[in-house]
Image: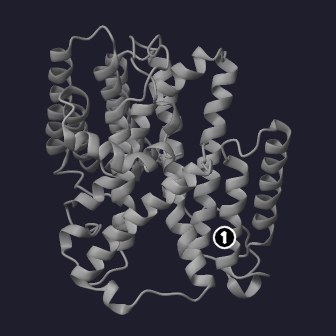
Amino acid sequence: MLSANFEESSIATVAAPVRAITKSIQRIRSIDAFRGLTIFIMIFVNELAGVKGVPAWMEHMPATIDGMTFVDVVFPAFLFIVGMSIPFAIAHRRAKGDNFIQLQRHVLARTLGLLVLGVFMVNAEDGYNQAAMPLSINLWSLLFYFAAFLVWHVRLTKSNRLDWTLRLFGVIGLLALALVFRGGDGTAYLAPQWWGILGLIGWAYLIATLCFQLSGGEKLPLVLMLISCVLYYCVGHSFVMQHSVLLPVLFSQGGNAAHASIVLCGVITAQIFFQSHEENSNRWVQASVLAGSLALFAALLRPDWHISKIAATPSWCLYSAAICIALFMLLHYLVEVKQQPVGRFLCRFVEPAANSPLLTYLLPFVVYQLMQICSVSLPDFLRKGSAGIAWSACYALLIMLAAKGLNRLNLRLQL
């Protein structure tokens, strides 16, 4: 799950605020297309990161440079689609009869799941002490993904008892792997060096979900909360922090607030397009105004807070959100409004990732660990220049096909 619930955006309409979404009738194909396309590009750029001699516009912009490439918009696109899914997921839970406590427990469980996955994945990449561990980091990582599958699988058997037994074994496996992990000098245990991509999504999801509930789903309060997230970051990175001991502590979560601002942009966009009381023409006007306003404020903030993905600056967040809104508007027009052949092809192409995003996201990491264990590596020519770029695109396609095959075997993950 790369969102509140990638699987629960299959609801036809969003009626006003939290009274929002009603009954699940069909999947919203434009949301599926955006989600699946984002994951496909993510797999492509992750594989491309190991290729030498690619154009600068196909790499992340260095932290010291005021600018961004399309690669720097991939993570914001994840966050944006998280936001678009939140109103649907909450309405779905309420339609199932969840009360306030059950809903909050559901939100916290998802957040915890993302944080756990993020921390394990980060420690598998760096900070481990191989000599102090009883098994190789590659095997440790592979066992982690297997345990994660047991915990978050979607109905493997016809028996609820057996499914929950498998989940219990998965939890035990994660605990055992955490205990045998060693980092640093060999005495350190599993710890969040940083939260990882999934962990960052988890914090942003939690903040945005609370904002959505507090706002009642109304667009104006959501916009004010979006502005508050941006201001929180700005204050936390201003000169006033230099003259206080308490303020740096109170404003220490600027990065999470910045990421949450992108999620809130997704929430607002979903409310604009799928509130049943909105006229079609009014939706396009509101979305255009929102995207234009975000770009304008990004330009105004840029002199003081340069565009930087690494620093999660407001200018990067707002520019990225504006781009995501524009892209979603295009997809919505092609897929939902005009129902163009290219839109139908795109939906079919990204269907595996849209139907099982968490599984599709994790598959490349599993493949990498298997290759390391089996001492398999790619030929050098596939790690350079145009051949490397072509291979990265083919690899992303192969992962999509693998996800489709696993879906047919009823192997899916969901937080």
On the image, the x and y values in percent for residue 344 come to 27, 40
What amino acid is labelled 1 in the image? Leu
Answer with left or right where residue 223 lies relative to residue 169. left
Q: Is residue 282 above or below residue 155?
A: above
Q: Element type at marker 1?
A: helix
On the image, the x and y values in percent for residue 60 come to 29, 67
Q: Is residue 75 above or below residue 24?
A: below
Say whether residue 72 is visible: yes
Residue to which mark 1 is pinned: 142
Q: Residue furthest top?
A: 277
Marks counted in the figure total 1
Closest to the observer, 7 or 52: 7
Closest to the observer, 414 or 336: 336
Closest to the observer, 121 or 399: 399
Q: Is residue 20 above or below residue 315?
A: above
Q: Quadrant of residue 16?
A: top left
Answer few, some or many: residues within 10 Å of disc 1's Cα (few below 14, many 20 plus, some between 14 and 19): many
Say whether residue 321 is visible: no
On the image, the x and y values in percent for residue 29 come to 35, 33
> Which residue is located at x 69 percent, y 21 percent?
101
> Which residue is located at x 22 percent, y 80 percent?
386
> Which residue is located at x 31 percent, y 68 percent?
393
